[in-house]
Amino acid sequence: MTDRIIQLLDLRTARLPVPDAVESATADGHVADRRGRPLRDLRISVTDRCNFRCTYCMPKEVFDRDYRFLPHAELLSFEEITRLARAFIANGVEKIRLTGGEPLLRKDLHKLIEMLSRLTTLQGQPLDLALTTNGSLLARKARDLAAAGLRRITVSLDGLDDTVFKRMNDVDFPVSDVLAGIDAAAEAGLGPVKINMVVKRGVNDHEVVAMARHFRGTGQIVRFIEFMDVGSSNGWRMDDVVPSAEIVQRLDRDVAPLVAIDPNYAGEVAERWRYRDGSGEVGVISSVTQAFCHSCTRARLSTEGMLYLCLFADSGYDLRRLLRGGAEAAGVDDAALAMAVAQIWSQRADRYSEVRSAATGPRPKVEMSYIGG
Ligand code: SAM
Ligand code: SF4
Ligand code: SF4
């Protein structure tokens, strides 16, 4: 196990050089990657820490007392995050999602939200600013988050049965507190709240129908996510995956008849379904059985400023070094930062989920809790 931890820590420092030219652009003149995909979404991990130990994400045996989380000085400051966000917006980013680890553990997060909510897209529109949380601190914080300018929220909840949920979060956290958080978010104006359930066969798949029934008619939207082989520590096996098609069949049969609906925008990862009787919407995210790499417009910024171009990447680009400079040089200016982002994105060719069967194996990958989901 020690070797494994060292390997995980080493991965965080795998740095790639920033390329020195922009290779391609979209029709509107913005940067495109080598597969013609524009840069539209940025996920920012604001902490690598979490108060849960979900067995599929931060298993206790790896993320234990001896695990070395990032020291505070390594974290990007709110000012640095905001500067980097501007560099991404200059390249076409329209949506920013704060994640982690557990983002609500980051002190004064509402201050960062205030800073980001003042930014506008290249078209002069307000930024689509969202957050993904485990909901444990949400009942207390929802109002402040909304007041700071947060627009949307996604809450993860893997079951309604306390025994099942506690077994998955592995810290004995009760369902009722997460439900209270979801209610508080809706009351604060952050609805419709999206509720993400990672489905693992034989662990919580029997909770799928109960989850759908519970939220049907409430206005909130449950999304069922296929268990993914992110990171190197969750012991993923294809047998654990419940294909989305099977989930849709179960809901259609045991909850209420469903009909497919159009995506909200090009490249939306969730496939949307609505109940025929108008009682609401559900979604499925088929990251394993139906890869959506061809329309992947997401970049990921780690807590200490490494840029990753794919959830399954094994190395990233050190933007913090560009920001802060080093002993030999001062950090670069905003224009150079934006250019560096363009250069990096233009070289991207990742499509891990489309080639998963060949790529899955002992190959090391960064952990989800580190780069954010
Ligand atoms: N702590 C927050 C939370 O749980 O919502 C934010 C970070 S978490 C890494 C983001 C999302 O990734 C969560 O919805 C979580 O369920 C999902 N996730 C983590 N590991 C996963 C895996 N192996 N397969 C699929 N989804 C996963
Ligand atoms: Fe924490 Fe979210 Fe990972 Fe669960 S999924 S361990 S709540 S970061
Ligand atoms: Fe995007 Fe990588 Fe996921 Fe494909 S595997 S959708 S390229 S993050």
Image (cartoon, grey):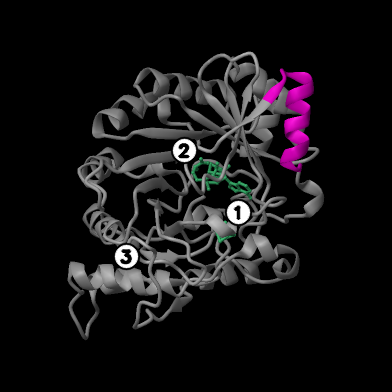
The magenta segment: 242-258
Give the amino acid at mark 3. Answer: Gly
- Residue marked by disc 1: 292
Relative to residue 123, is residue 175 depicted above or below?
above
Ligand 3 near label 1 (Cβ, under 8 Å)? yes
User: Residue 32 in the image: x percent, y percent?
Assistant: 42, 66
Secondary structure mostly seen in magenta is: helix
Q: Residues within 10 Å of mark 3 (few under 14, many from 20)?
A: few
Q: Residue furthest front?
A: 27
| Circle nearer the N terminus (2, 1) | 2
On the rendering, which quadrant does ligand 1 occupy? top right
In the rendered structure, find residue 85 and report the number of the disc placed on it.
none
Instruction: Indicate the amino acid at tag 2.
Output: Thr
* Residue 236 percent across, percent down from the top left: 73, 55
Does the numbered disc 2 mark a residue whose Cβ is under 8 Å from ligand 1? yes
Q: Name the disc covering residue 133, or none.
A: 2
Q: Amino acid at mark 1?
A: Phe
Secondary-structure class at tag 1: loop
Residue at mark 3: 29
